[in-house]
């Protein structure tokens, strides 16, 4: 252990702790910085994190210094503030300060540091600044403004150390130094948008999010990415019922501070044209009351032949489906299509299993089947086929087997299954409901509802509870809380109502 | 509840004879009216009634009036759709949709820019917030009338051509 005095406060730190982290702990806030990132190597190039260590002849950068026993450190004295201010002034010499058209404004390191340490009148005329390329598309997701770059090299280190693709580099010297991709190449790795997150300024911005919203207008809700079995923890940034972007939320057990580009785009699904927004009765849009009669017949006791769950539905939804099937005396259950939602995984984050909750089906003992087996079971089942989530009829075998059957589908998107069903009940998409996904490690990850459901859609768990009530369950669970209690009891799970907090939502920005 | 024993209100005051015959009071009222008429005929300049719309009130130079959007030299809007104004607006009545400008030197421009004049409180904070001097409340236009609520939501084209009314 090393005893260190920071701003007059004596604290103990483990040997090998970076002075940067020690200072952050002692101060309750990080030192000003651009280049340091806890998940990347140390570059020490921005010089903003300078502190005074007694006994050292000059100020030293905290990010590249380790704590030593007996160290006395000052982070807030005049000398340190002056240094930060001078360095900041240097970073701003050639900066265009085009905040009005810069998407980073509001979550920009440069703006924030300037408000804390700068606040001087610039002596550099706009006309004297070195001009560089602006709005250069450097990849499928990322757009680069070379003028705004502060050359912190975070993006370069990310591409070298995390994706190991090495697309980004710093070219030229002095005030001509600029960030870029090698000629003829592009920033096309599957994690490229993380460079946008870690870029402390608006040099790298997202093409998808570009000009869509000023960041201070967004509200954030913690969530879990439904893009694959990894279940990256995310922050859903939304406004007026529309999701504008997903950002990773740090969880060192799951995704660290990163997430993949594909996962960031899954939000588009929620606002898809073909969302189911109203109940359908044999293809006709109707009110909820109008499906009651048919549902009473199709989901009467003993009339259900097979109930099929889904690895895309939440743990609670699958649990309620199972409970409903048992109550209706359904002969058979299936967890859904085993081979649906497969892709290519990698050894960074993405899993080949593109469904978020396959482990959840295991917990509920819902076995999945391949298309041929599932089609066979549908063919043999006598009575209604009750389908939950996904689009099982996308598999031609299943679609063929469903022909001529009585089908009730509780789902979110129009597709082959919705087209085949007699009754379609519009449920909630992942961001429109609270729930639990079980990721590939078996972690139970709960998430709250972020946005409102479209039109007449209802929370899927509520639809299933209504069916339970109609099927004569004496005290059907009235809230998701009660559903979770039942689930916890039935399957010996840790209390789902008090899982470790999904994590605080950092204020907009969160570039560490 | 009983009113007995309460003092009589002034309205129940006994009338004097002069009041009860009315004629005297009528003549006194006519006298006031005729007095104003004569004064207005002799001093038309001081007459408080204005012959609107032929004659308009002259406001102080600090009067703001309806907004206008400023133009660049080529006539395009100066606004870069930064949405400072709509963020700052206390009435939340500015609605801007930003878009990519074909000219990379401009980069961002307002695809649409709507102000709901019925909700606006003419505080001028949008003008103060704008970093580009793109929106001004200096037209002096105070005649804002329409026969439908929707017509009070004015768009980019309207605001760009919302020239001052010539009073300044
Ligand atoms: S990078 Fe930051 S300081 Fe620079 S223009 Fe963008 S918001 Fe402004
Ligand atoms: S583009 Fe951003 S992350 Fe990359 S070096 Fe420049 S400022 Fe740093
Ligand atoms: S004058 Fe005030 S209320 Fe009206 S648009 Fe501007 S900021 Fe909003
Ligand atoms: S503040 Fe000015 S430049 Fe920005 S959106 Fe409003 S009018 Fe346009
Ligand atoms: S954060 Fe220490 S030098 Fe940049």
Image (cartoon, coloured by chain):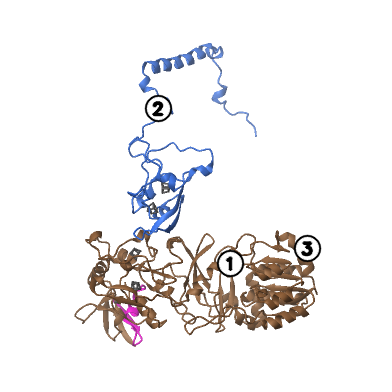
Q: Which mark is residue B55?
A: 2
Residue located farthest toward the front when viewing the structure as drawn: A184
Ligand 3 is within 8 Å of the C-beta of the residue at disc 2: no
User: Residue A432: image x %, image y %?
Assistant: 58, 66
Q: Quadrant of the N terminus of chain A?
A: bottom left
User: Residue B154: image x %, image y %?
Assistant: 47, 45
Q: Who is closer to the viewer here, A34 or A18?
A: A34
Image colour assigned to chain B: blue
Q: Who is closer to the viewer here, A371 or A496?
A: A371
Q: Are marks 3 and 2 in contact (CB under 8 Å)?
A: no
Q: In the rendered image, which residue does mark 3 sit on? A: A293
Q: Which mark is residue A432?
A: 1
Q: Who is closer to the viewer here, A264 or A371?
A: A371
Cα distance between the residues tagged 1 and 3: 27 Å
Q: Residue A121 in magenta?
A: no
Marks 2, 1 in one chain: no
Cα distance between the residues tagged 2 and 1: 59 Å
Image colour assigned to chain A: brown
Magenta span of residues: A8-30
Tell me what residue is drawn at x 54 percent, y 12 percent. Answer: B17
Cα distance between the residues tagged 3 and 2: 71 Å
Q: Residue A21 in magenta?
A: yes
């Amino acid at each position: 252990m090393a005893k260190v005095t920071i701003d007059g406060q004596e604290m103990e730190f483990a040997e090998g702790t970076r002075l940067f982290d020690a200072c952050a702990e002692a101060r309750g806030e990080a030192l000003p910085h651009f280049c340091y990132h806890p998940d990347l190597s140390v570059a020490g190039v921005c010089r903003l994190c300078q502190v005074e260590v007694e006994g050292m002849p000059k100020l030293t950068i905290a990010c590249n210094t380790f704590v030593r026993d007996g160290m006395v450190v000052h982070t807030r004295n005049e000398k340190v503030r002056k240094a930060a201010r001078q360095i900041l002034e240097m970073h701003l010499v050639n900066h265009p300060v085009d905040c009005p058209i810069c998407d980073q404004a509001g979550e920009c390191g440069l703006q924030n540091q300037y408000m804390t340490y700068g606040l001087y009148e610039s002596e550099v005329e706009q006309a004297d600044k070195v001009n560089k390329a602006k709005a250069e598309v450097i990849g499928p997701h990322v757009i680069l403004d070379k003028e705004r770059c502060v050359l912190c090299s975070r993006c370069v280190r990310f591409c070298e150390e995390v994706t190991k693709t090495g697309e980004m580099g710093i070219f030229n010297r002095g005030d001509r130094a600029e960030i870029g991709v090698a000629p003829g190449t592009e920033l096309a790795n599957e994690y490229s948008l993380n460079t946008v997150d870690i870029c402390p300024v608006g040099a790298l911005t997202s093409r998808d999010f570009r000009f869509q919203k000023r960041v201070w207008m967004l509200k954030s809700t913690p969530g879990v990415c439904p893009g694959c079995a990894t279940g990256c923890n995310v922050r859903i940034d939304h406004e007026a019922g529309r999701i504008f972007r997903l950002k990773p939320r740090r969880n060192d057990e799951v995704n660290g501070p990163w997430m993949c580009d594909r996962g960031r785009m899954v939000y588009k699904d929620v606002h898809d044209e073909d969302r189911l927004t109203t109940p359908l009765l044999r293809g006709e849009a109707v009110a909820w009351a109008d499906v009651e009669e048919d549902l009473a017949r199709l989901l009467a006791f003993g009339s259900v032949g097979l109930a099929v769950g889904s690895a895309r539905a939440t743990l609670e939804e699958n649990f309620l489906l199972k409970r409903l099937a048992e109550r209706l005396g359904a002969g058979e259950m299936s967890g859904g299509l085993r081979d649906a939602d497969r892709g290519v995984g990698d050894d960074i984050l993405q899993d080949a299993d593109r469904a978020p909750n396959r482990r959840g089906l295991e917990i509920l003992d819902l076995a999945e089947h391949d298309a041929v087996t599932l089609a066979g079971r549908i063919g043999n089942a006598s009575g209604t086929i009750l389908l939950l989530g996904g689009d099982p009829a996308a598999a031609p075998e299943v679609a063929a087997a469903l022909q001529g059957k009585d089908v009730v589908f509780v789902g979110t998107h129009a597709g082959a299954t919705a087209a085949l069903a007699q009754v379609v009940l519009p449920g909630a998409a992942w961001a429109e409901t609270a729930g639990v996904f079980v990721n590939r490690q078996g972690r139970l990850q709960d998430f709250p509802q972020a946005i409102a459901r479209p039109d007449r859609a209802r929370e899927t768990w509520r639809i299933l509870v209504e069916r339970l009530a109609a099927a004569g369950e004496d005290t059907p669970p009235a809230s998701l809380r009660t559903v979770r209690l039942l689930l916890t009891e039935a399957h010996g799970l840790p209390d789902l109502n008090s899982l470790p907090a999904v994590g605080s939502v950092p204020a907009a920005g969160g570039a560490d | 509840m009983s009113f007995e024993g309460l003092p009589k209100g002034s309205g129940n005051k006994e009338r004097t004879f002069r009041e009860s015959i009315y004629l005297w009071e009528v003549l006194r009222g006519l006298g006031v009216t005729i007095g104003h008429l004569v004064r207005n005929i002799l001093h038309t300049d001081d007459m408080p009634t204005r012959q609107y719309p032929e004659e308009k009130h002259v406001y102080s130079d600090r009067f703001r009036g309806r907004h206008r959007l400023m133009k660049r030299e080529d006539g395009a809007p100066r606004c870069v759709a930064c949405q400072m104004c709509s963020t700052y607006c206390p009435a939340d009545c500015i609605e801007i949709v930003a878009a990519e400008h074909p000219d990379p030197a401009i980069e961002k421009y307002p695809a649409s820019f709507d102000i709901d004049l019925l909700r606006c409180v003419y505080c001028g904070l949008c003008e103060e917030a704008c970093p580009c001097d793109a929106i001004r409340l200096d037209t002096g236009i105070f005649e804002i009338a329409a026969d439908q609520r929707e017509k009070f939501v004015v768009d980019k084209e309207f605001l760009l051509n919302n020239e001052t009314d010539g009073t300044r």
